[in-house]
Amino acid sequence: MSRVALGLLMLMLVGCTSLQPTATPVVLFVTATPEPPTPTPQFSPTPVIAPLLNLTLTPRPTSTPTPVRTPTLAPTFTPSFTVTYTDTPEPTFAARTCTIAPQGGFAALYNRDSALQQALGCAQSLAVPVNGAVQDFENGRMIWVSALADVPTGTIYAIFNTGQYIRYADTWVEGVDPVQPVSNEGAPSGRVAPIRGFGKVWALNAAARNGLGWALGAESGTGAQVQRFERGEMVYIGALNQTYIFLAQGGVWRLENTPF
């Protein structure tokens, strides 16, 4: 029985072994994992230097920056139209209306000469009869009128043979100023020094004295007519039967042999 039992036991062990699955070997492929690269520092570490001395540093003051204003640009305007300038010519004298007309012989001279009208402009007064005087000199003539038309001021004209003239106010006062301011000493033969208003202007103004020279004879009285204009005067001297046209611009005078 023991042998039979032993045999049965062996058969049982063999049968159990045959019933277990056969183990399949598993092959594992192991790949070595590379070590991560050592990171390279982007900045070199700043070495720390131990202070050699115990120094106390005063912090620098922090300045507040002054803001800079950005200039505001002026706006640019685009014109919606183009401006065109047209020169307006000055009106001719004929187109102007003068409230006072020249009179007598002055009108005859004035109306026939458009250039004279432009030079003198409109009359500013009527033709006024005044007292006058005239005296000839080596290089010209002096004329005195008792008033400048409606302006009650005596006037003396120093007229030079060069075609220029100088107008002076007559400031000679009888009983106050000397009759003969300059003596005749040094005058050439047949020449004299002027007297009264002519003499005062001649003595005090080198331009008149040097420009006219010595007088050729005594002065003589005469009747006269004066009319003022915008830019000058017309003066008629009865003793000469001549009209002087004194233009303010350029100091030019013109002489016309036209009776008043």
Image (tube, grey):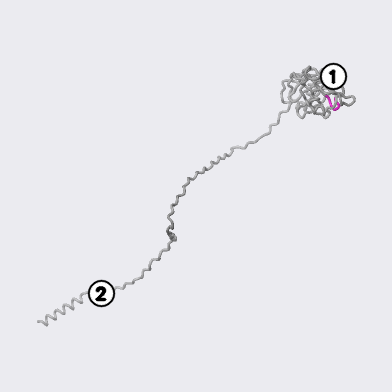
Toward the front, the furthest residue is 53
Which residue in the rendered view is the most extreme toward the left? 1
Direction from residue 42 to residue 173 in the image, left or right: right
Figure check: 56 above or below 19: above
- Closest to the observer, 88 or 106: 106
Tell me if residue 139 is in the magenta stretch. Answer: yes
**Numbered disc 1: secondary structure:** strand
Residue 104 in the image, given as x and y percentages of width and height: 79, 19
User: Quick check: 7 left or right of 138?
Assistant: left
- Observer able to see residue 2: yes
Q: Which residues are magenta?
A: 137-141
- Mark 2 sits on what residue? 23
Give the dominant element type of the magenta stretch: helix, strand or loop: strand
Left or right, 208 with respect to 9, comes to: right
Res 181 → quadrant: top right
Task: Say whether residue 129 is visible.
Answer: no
Residue 55 location, x and y as percent?
44, 54
Residue 227 image-quadrant placement = top right
Residue placed furthest toward the right: 189
Residue at position x 69%, y 32% in the image: 88
The image's mark for residue 237 is: none
**Percent coordinates x, y for residue 86 in the rendering:** 67, 34
Q: Is residue 49 left or right of residue 209?
A: left
**Residue 122 in magenta?**
no
Residue placed most toward the observer, 108 or 201: 201
Q: Which residue is mark 1?
A: 220
Cα distance, mark 1 to mark 2? 171 Å
Say which label, 1 or 2, has the lower sequence index: 2
Query: The disc labelled 1 sits on which kind of residue?
Result: Ser
What is the three-letter code of the residue carrying label 2? Ala
